[in-house]
Image: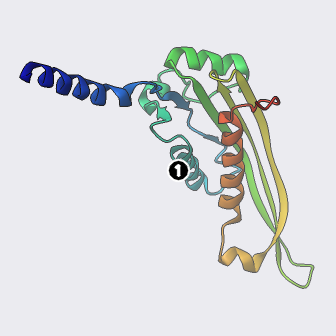
């Protein structure tokens, strides 16, 4: 009787230890290519570097995603950055880094100009850039040109940072489009 009871306890212990491991999926490896910024046309380039990495870490969190180490990615990126943001270039980086998702961004210009001919002082705002990603899990290549042009009351810039808000909003939207899974039209 003691042997039967010991066998049942051992069997239950093995099941309880192994059941949580059944059906687990390995985290998708993500290669985040450092943002390319034209520092001659973007005044606060260092701020955008940190905004970029903060959003990447926020959106690609473990256990769903695993960010590939920067040193591993830097081996395959030229010092001047990517020349083209086309699909074959991203696919090549996927192969070399063994990544399922590759994300890259270029920020070409951020500009604000004071306009004082109205009653209230206004800033005309302009941001231009490019975002690309390749998701091998969904087979989706995503390319989007960032182009923001607007106006903001200069008084409002004392309490908020329009550049950070626009950049973060657009980048989060692009990443969501990169990682979203197409929903089936036929509902069961």
How many other residues sit within 10 Å of disc 1, few (<14), some (14-19) or many (≥20)? few
Q: Is residue 17 left or right of residue 81?
A: left
Q: Nearer the viewer, residue 113 or 101?
A: 101
* Residue at the extreme front of the image, as rendered: 1
Q: How many marks?
A: 1
Task: Decide: is 41 above or below 163.
Answer: above
The x, y position of residue 60, in whole percent, is 53, 40
The x, y position of residue 130, in whole percent, is 74, 38
Q: Is residue 155 left or right of residue 53?
A: right
Q: Nearer the viewer, residue 28 or 121?
A: 28
Quadrant of the rendered structure where residue 33 is? top right
Residue in view at x 65 percent, y 35 percent: 179
Quadrant location of the N terminus in the rendered image: top left
Q: Nearer the viewer, residue 130 or 175?
A: 175
Q: Is residue 108 left or right of residue 80?
A: right
* Residue at the extreme right of the image, as rendered: 118
Quadrant location of the C terminus in the rendered image: top right
Task: Decide: is 103 above or below 168.
Answer: above
Mark 1, secondary structure of its residue = helix
Task: Decide: is 5 above or below 129.
Answer: above
Residue identifier under label 1: 54
Task: Decide: is 159 above or below 134.
Answer: below
Residue in view at x 53 percent, y 22 percent: 99
The x, y position of residue 30, in whole percent, is 53, 30
Q: Is residue 6 left or right of residue 98?
A: left
* Residue at the extreme left of the image, as rendered: 2
Q: How is the image coloured?
A: rainbow
Q: Nearer the viewer, residue 141 or 137?
A: 137
The x, y position of residue 7, in whole percent, is 16, 20
């Amino acid at each position: 009787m003691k042997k039967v009871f010991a066998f049942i306890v051992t069997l239950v212990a093995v099941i309880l230890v192994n059941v949580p491991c059944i059906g687990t999926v390995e985290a998708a490896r993500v290669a985040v290519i450092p943002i390319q910024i034209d520092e001659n046309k973007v005044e606060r380039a260092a701020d955008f570097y940190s905004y970029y990495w903060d959003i990447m870490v926020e959106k690609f969190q473990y256990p769903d995603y695993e960010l590939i180490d920067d040193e591993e990615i830097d081996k395959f990126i030229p010092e001047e950055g990517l020349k083209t943001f086309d699909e074959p270039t991203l696919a090549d980086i996927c192969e070399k880094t063994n990544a399922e998702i590759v994300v890259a961004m270029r920020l070409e210009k951020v500009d604000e100009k004071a306009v004082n001919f109205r009653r209230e002082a206004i800033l005309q705002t302009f941001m231009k850039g490019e975002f690309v990603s390749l998701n091998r899990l969904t087979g989706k290549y995503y390319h989007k040109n960032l182009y923001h042009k607007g106006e903001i009351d200069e008084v409002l810039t004392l309490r908020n940072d329009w550049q950070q808000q626009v950049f973060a909003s657009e980048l989060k939207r692009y990443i969501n489009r990169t990682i979203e899974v197409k929903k089936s039209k036929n509902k069961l």
